[in-house]
Structures are given as C-alpha cells and as structure tokens.
Image (spheres, rainbow, N blue to C red):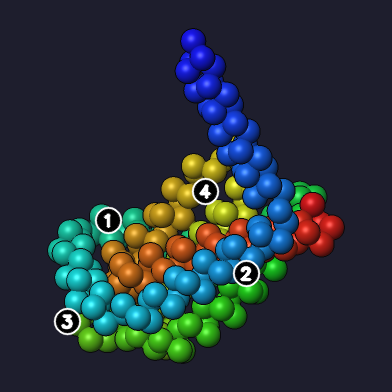
Amino acid sequence: MANEKSDKHKSNSNHKLSSGLYHHLHNNKKLKIYLPFLILILIYSMLFIFYRPLTDLDTVLFLEISKTRTPLLEALFAVITKGGTFTFIILIILVLWIKGERRPALYLAVGLIVDAILVYIFKISIHRPRPYEVLSIQALELGDSFGSLPSGHTSRAFLCATILSNFYRKYLMIFFLIAISVGFSRVYIGSHYPLDVIIGAINGVFLGMLVVNLLDRHGLS
C-alpha cells in the first residue's frame, strides 16, 4: 500500500514537472523566436558537412522518380507546381487583404520577402546545378540561374502552409498536402533534386514559424 502511494506520488510529480516544462516552453516567447532560427542554422550547417555524400543518393532517387513520368502526370504536376510561384502567393495575399483578413495577409507578405532573401543567399552560396544542366533529362520548366538548392517554390509553398495554418487551423492538412504536392512536382518536372525540395520544405516551415512568432511578439497578434 505504501509502495502504491509512493508510485502515485512520483507519477503526479513527474506529470506536474512535464506539464510545467511544456507550459514554460509554450509561453516562452524568446524561445519561440530563437528555436526555429537555431534549427535552420543547424540544418544548413549539417547540409554543408554532408552535402557531397548525399548527392549520389539524391541523383539516384531523382532518376528513379523521372522513370515514372507519363504525359498525364506531367500535365498535372506542371499545373500544381504553379502553387509555389511568387505570383500565386501574391494573389493569395491580395485576396486575403481584399476580404479584410489583414493579419494573415501581412504575415504572408513579410514571410515572402524574408524567404526570397534567404533562399537567394543559399542558392548562390551552394550553387548546385539543376538536374537538367548535368543529366540527360528534359525539364518541363526551366528554373532561375541562381542554383538548384534549396527549392524556392517548395520553400514558399511550405511557408504559406505554415503561416496560414496559424490562422485557419482546420485547413492545416489541406495546406500541407498542397505544399507537399508542389514540392514533389518540382522533382517530377525535372527542375529540382529531392534534397532541394526537402531543404526547401524545412526552410519554409521554420521560417514561417519564425515570422509568426516574431510578428506576434511585436504586437500583431
């Protein structure tokens, strides 16, 4: 009986400790800002370290995906990939603004600007050639000349999904399914390697979190 009470007391103490830690992390605004930023730094640091060992596997995976091409899927993904363009995201911002949804529109606009700068910096720093520049494969869409990694379309799609999910939580699954489709489309149409898309997705998610937490902290919540 005494052991049962002791175990119960320990269980309650552990629960209170974990609950207190959760609330501390959840309410720590500085941590909310710095954590996504630090994770991005860690990810890109690891990328620079393991970049070359990953490229061979990345190329093999890209070629395997390319073998599944069909005219119907090519046409489908050529349309889906437009969901990651600047034009499409700006259109979303304008629609939200006109409908009076000023906060999500503002958050998206800020995120889009920051994302464009960050993606550009990493593209020219890494300067990875696009698949169609080094492999015997035809791309359905030619990308910019800055480099292949990270995928800008994917980063914008996941940035948009992350920010919009903060305001319209019931559509979270839909937003991220669209973002995943955009990311896969970049590989399917031959514009990016899978690694470009994965890094772009991570970049978009954590940058979206950073923008939301930063703007919330400065009185826009």
Q: Position of residue 130 (x, y in %)?
A: 32, 82
Q: CA distance from mark 4 to mark 1?
A: 21 Å
Q: Earlier in the sequence, mark 4 or mark 2?
A: 2
Residue identifier under label 1? 73
Mark 1 is on which residue type?
A: Leu
Mark 3 is on which residue type?
A: Ser
- 155 to the left or right of 54: right
Q: Find out whether the residues at labels 4 and 1 contact each other: C-beta distance under 8 Å.
A: no
Residue identifier under label 2? 112
Q: CA distance from mark 4 to mark 3?
A: 34 Å
For residue 175, the mark is 4
- Can the viewer see residue 87? no
| Front of the two marks 2 and 3 | 2
Relative to the observer, which residue lies in front, 25 or 211? 25
Note whether 154 is above or below 177 in the view shown: below
Mark 2 is on which residue type?
A: Leu
Q: Earlier in the sequence, mark 4 or mark 3?
A: 3
- 64 to the left or right of 168: left
The residue at 70%/68% (across/down) is 110
The residue at 21%/62% (across/down) is 65
Mark 4 is on which residue type?
A: Phe
Q: CA distance from mark 1 to mark 2?
A: 29 Å
Q: Secondary structure at mark 2?
A: helix
Q: Secondary structure at mark 4?
A: helix
Q: CA distance from mark 2 to mark 3?
A: 33 Å
Q: Position of residue 58 (x, y in %)?
A: 24, 71
| Front of the two marks 1 and 3 | 3
The residue at 57%/54% (across/down) is 162
Note whether 120 is above or below 110 in the view shown: below
For residue 186, the mark is none
